[in-house]
Amino acid sequence: MTFGFALFFLIVYGGASWVTGFYPGGLRVALPMEQHIPFVPGWAAVYVSMDVLLLLSLFIFRTWRQMLPFALALCAETVLGALCFLVLPVEVAWPPRAVTGVWASVFQAADTMNLERNYLPSLHVAFACTAALAYRERSGPVASTLFTLWALAIAASTLLIHEHHLVDVFAGALLAWGTWRVVAPRVRRESFLEAVRVEALCAREMYRFARRHPRYGLIALVLYQQSIGRWRKARRARAGFCFLQLVDDVLDGDRPVEGEPLDAIDVLLRTLETGAPGPATEFHDTAVALGRALLAELTVREQVFELVRTMRKDRERVRDGRWWDAETLQAQLGNTFRLSVGLMLNVADARVRAEDAPSLLAALGWCSVMRDLREDLAQGLFNVPKDIAEEVRAQGHDPADFDSLLAAEAGRAWVRAEYQRARALLDRSAKELALQDGRPGVALLRLFHRSVESFWARKLPRRMPFLREVPALGIS
C-alpha cells in the first residue's frame, strides 16, 4: 500500500501540476497580514519531515486492515486536492526566495517536493493532520500530543518557508478533518474490508493464472472490462472465475498443495457447505474467501458444489490411471461445461440457459480436449477413448505420449474424426444461437462460439498440420 500510494500520488499530484502549468494565471489568496510572516529557511527541515511522519504508519499499523483507512484517506485527499488545483489555481504572492549556506540543500529538497502551482488546499498540511488524527487513535497521551505538535509544526513550516498561504493551510486542515471523518468509519466496516480482501485475492490469482498462460490474462481483462459500471455486482463473476480456476489448478497439479489434492478439495467443500474449520494454508484460505464471495446471494449454490465434484472426478481418474470409453468421456465433458457455462450465465443475470446451446457445450468440450491434449496426457489425464488407445498400442505406439499418439494412424484418424465432429457442432451451434437472438446472455455464448471457431480454423491446424488435408468438412 505504501508503494502503491506513492505511485498514485506522483501520477495525480504531478499530473495536476503539469496541467495547471498551461494556465495563464491564478487566484490571489494572500491576506494582508501575511506580509509580516518571516522567511525562515531552517524550517525546511520540518517541512520535509512529513515523509518521516507518513512512513511511521508502517510501524503504527501492524496489518493491512488497520492501515487501509489511512491509505484510502490520503488517496481521497489527493484526488480532491488535485480537483481543487485544476478548478481553483492559485498564484502565490510571496517575494522571490534565495537560500545560501547550511540550509540551502534542505530548502531545495522542500521546494522540489512541493512542485509548482499546487497550492489550495495544502496537501502537506492535509497529510500531516490526517497522520496525527489516525495515529492518535492508536497512541497514548504523550505520543498523541507529540503527533499533534508535529502536524502543527509542519503546517507552520509551509508558511515560514513561503510555500503556502494561510488560506491553503486552513483548507488543508479542513480537508484532513472532513476526509478522515467520512472515510475512516466506512473503510473500517467488515463488509468493506472483506470486499477489498476478495478483490486483492482476485488480482493476485489472475496474475498467477496469466503467468502460466496468456489466455487467462485475456479472460481477466474481459472480466474487468465487463465490471466497469457494475463493479460491486460483478464481483461474483471475478471471484467465481478465480475460485473455479484455482480448484482446477489444484486438481490438475498446476498449483501444488500439501498431500493429495482430492483431500484438499474435500476439506474445502466441507468448509463451504458446513462452515467447518480447515487448515491454515494459503490455498484453503484463498479458496474459502473466493468461494464465499461467489456463493453470496447466489441462487444456485448446489450447482457450484456439483461442478467442483464433477471436476474432482478427473483427478480421481488421474490418480487411478483410468482410460474411459468415448461415452463416459463425453458425459464428463458435457456435465463440466453444462454446469460451468450455466453458472456463468446465472452470475451474469442472463435470461438464456446453458441447455439452450447444447452444441456449443459439446464444442467447448472438444476444444478443451484438443487444446490441452499434450499437457493432459503428460499429467496422466487421458481424454483419448479407451478403444482408440488400444488401437494405438496395437500399432506399436504409446497413447499416453502426445507425439507417439499422433504418430499412429489410429491416433491421427481419431483426431481427424474429432475435427470433423467439431465442425458439425459449430454449424449447429450457430443455428441454435440464432434462435436465441435478443435474449440477455446470448452475447456471452457468442463470444465462446467465436473462440472455439478461431481455435478450429486457425490454431489447431497450426499445431497439427495434417488437419489441413482433412476432406469434406461440410462447412455450412
Image: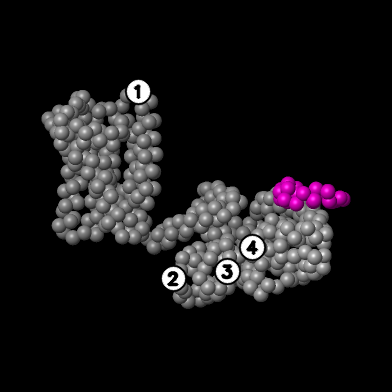
The magenta segment is: 453-476
Going from the N terminus, do you reach mark 3 or mark 2 first? 2
Residue 189 visible within the image:
yes
Mark 2, secondary structure of its residue: loop
Task: Using the image, tell me which numbered label, if any, was put on residue 280.
Answer: 2
> Can you give x and y, in whole percent of width and height, for residue 53 in the image?
24, 48
- The relative height of residue 214 versus residue 281 in the rendered view (above or below) is above
Q: Is residue 425 left or right of residue 42?
A: right
Amino acid at the residue labelled 4: Ser
Using the numbered discs, state the Cα–Cα distance from disc 3 to disc 2 in whole angstroms.
24 Å
Separation of disc 2 and disc 4 at Cα?
28 Å
Amino acid carrying label 3: it is Arg
Q: Is residue 5 above or below residue 19?
A: below
* Residue occupying the point 35% across, 32% down: 17
Q: Which residue is mark 4?
A: 340
Residue 112 location, x and y as percent? 28, 33
Task: Decide if residue 323 is on the left or right side of residue 226.
Answer: right
The residue under label 1 is: 24
Can I make out residue 338 in this image?
no
